[in-house]
Image (cartoon, helix red, strand yellow):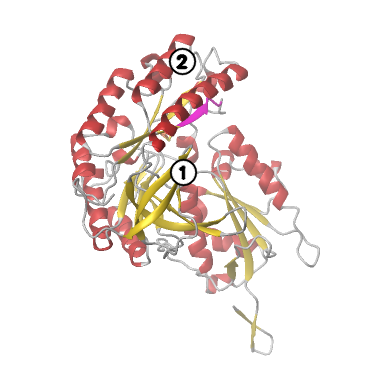
Amino acid sequence: MTTQTSDNTMTAIAPKRVRMVTLGCAKNEVDSDRMRTLIESSPAFVVVDDEDEPADVAIVNTCSFLVAAVQEGIDLTLEMTGAKLPDGEDVPVVMSGCIPSRYGEKLVEEMPEVAAFLPVDQEDSVVDVLARVCGLTSVDTYAPRTPEVLRTVRSATAYVMISDGCDRFCSFCAIPYIRGRYHSRPADVILDEVRGLVQGGVREVVLIGQDTGIWGSDLPEGRTLAWLIREVAAELRPVNGWLRVLYLQPEGMTDDLVAAIRDTPEVVPYIDLPLQHSCAEVLARMNRTGDDRSFTELIDRLRADIPGMVVRTTAMAGFPGETDEEFENLCAFLRRSDFDYTSVFAYSQEDGTAAAELPDQVDEDEKLERAQELQDIADTYGFASAATRVGKTYRVLVDATEQDDDGNVEAIGRAYFQAPDSDGVVHLGQADVTMGEFYEVRIDDAVCYELFGTIVAPDAAEPGPSGKRL
Ligand code: SF4
């Protein structure tokens, strides 16, 4: 970065160091990644990852899905506003993401410590905002202007957002008010992004969105998620990569989609169905559809049609009006369904949502007790599922390291039945590995959801009997 002085010479100026902190879900990770790529394409800024290194400006990319997440975002932002620059001035802090999207202008008055707010739909202007809060005036001459920059590859796994927003308006959920109406990203933009990621070393692409199953329904071409899956898989074929699709609502599980998951070699047999509840009356109050019978039929069909099928779900305890009987229906459904993984939530009364106005809100202690009961059931079946892996050999993608208690660096990988950031990992000890490569790993032990394994061979040359490389 240079600046022009009064005698017309150019003087080098050190780029401003930017600290980025991301809270919340994978979609926020993708947004942060995109902002980071924009920031790093400007010579005015450099992102610092080392927490001990001082920063000149900070961004907190926040989540506002639940009251607790909002509090965490506000607390962390305020904590970061306490940092000082060498001249004694405060380090300017930008709050981005879902809190500014949800609460808008009223934050300006309520959080005067924050230098700027950057809602989700304005995050492409991150460089301009950083320039403004850092007092840079000539940034326009070098700020990136490309609206669809490709992603920076930092791991062998990458989330790719195929849509944003949601039109379902589940009565408990603030997402449609935070992220807006449902909109699919165009196929060519997604495929360009995937191509760039694969060229950069990514071996597992994880498709995400609030409601991935209806991808394409708002685009003129009439394409479906099943079509997109086949196209993305073709990009991963030359590297024998994996494709994973998250957040499929049960209504979106068409025969064509099930066939695409089953018959496309790169697609791992793993489905994340956020069911929330099993009782028709509760689901109706949630503004959702289905019941325990239809969900059981769907899960049975998936397991029967797709070899090695792994099913994850989400269950919510204490929704307004939930009776003991309705709660028991959910417990029985979870026991019967034998899910590999279940995320459990206690209902949270969110401002501005329809459910917040419903009568018969469940007492806070009762909600927590019910959530704990669901968690115990989830863990009973989840731990048992993990234990069935012991003694078997799986293909594992090694994409991280961790330091053990003695300071040794151990390699970390994931098998097909472990989605990133949620289902545990395979610990490989101090194995001699190349990051971003697949290996054949024998699972030696399971502790809760964590697996411990030994590399027995390099990546398998041929797919297994299902046609997939698992
Ligand atoms: S499907 Fe329901 S829970 Fe999921 S983002 Fe949309 S409104 Fe929220």
User: Which quadrant of the figure has residue 53?
Assistant: bottom right
Q: Is residue 224 visible?
A: no
Task: Please give the residue where the numbered disc 2 appears in the rendered image.
Answer: 327
Q: Element at badge 2?
A: helix
Q: Report whether 173 appears left or right of 76.
A: left
Q: Is residue 341 visible?
A: yes
User: Hey, what amino acid is under mark 2?
Assistant: Phe
Q: Nearer the viewer, mark 1 or mark 2?
A: 1
Residue 112 rendering spot, x and y as whole percentages: 72, 47
Q: Report whether 317 appears left or right of 228.
A: right
Residue 354, magenta (yes or no): no
Residue 134 rendering spot, x and y as whole percentages: 67, 64
Quadrant containing the N terminus is bottom right
Which residue is drawn at the image coordinates 43% and 53% (left, top)? 413
Q: Element at badge 1?
A: loop
User: Which quadrant of the figure has residue 310?
Assistant: top left
User: Hey, what amino acid is under mark 1?
Assistant: Gly
Task: Work out whether 140 lies above or below 133.
Answer: below
Magenta highlight range? 343-348
Which residue is drawn at the image coordinates 22% and 57% (left, top)? 234
Task: Work out whether 372 lies above or below 470.
Answer: above
Which residue is drawn at the image coordinates 21% and 57% (left, top)? 462
Prevailing secondary structure class for the magenta stretch in the rendered image: strand
Residue 269 rendering spot, x and y as whole percentages: 28, 42
User: Which quadrant of the figure has residue 245?
Assistant: top left
* Real-space Cα separation, disc 1 to disc 2, in angstroms: 28 Å
Residue 77: mark in rendering:
none
Mark 1 is surrounded, within 10 Å at the Cα level, by few (under 14), some (14 to 19) or many (20 or more) other residues, namely: some
Task: Work out whether 397 lies above or below 288.
Answer: below
Task: Please give the residue where the numbered disc 1 appears in the rendered image.
Answer: 424
If the picture is divided into quarters, which one holds ligand 1?
top left
Residue 351 rendering spot, x and y as whole percentages: 57, 28
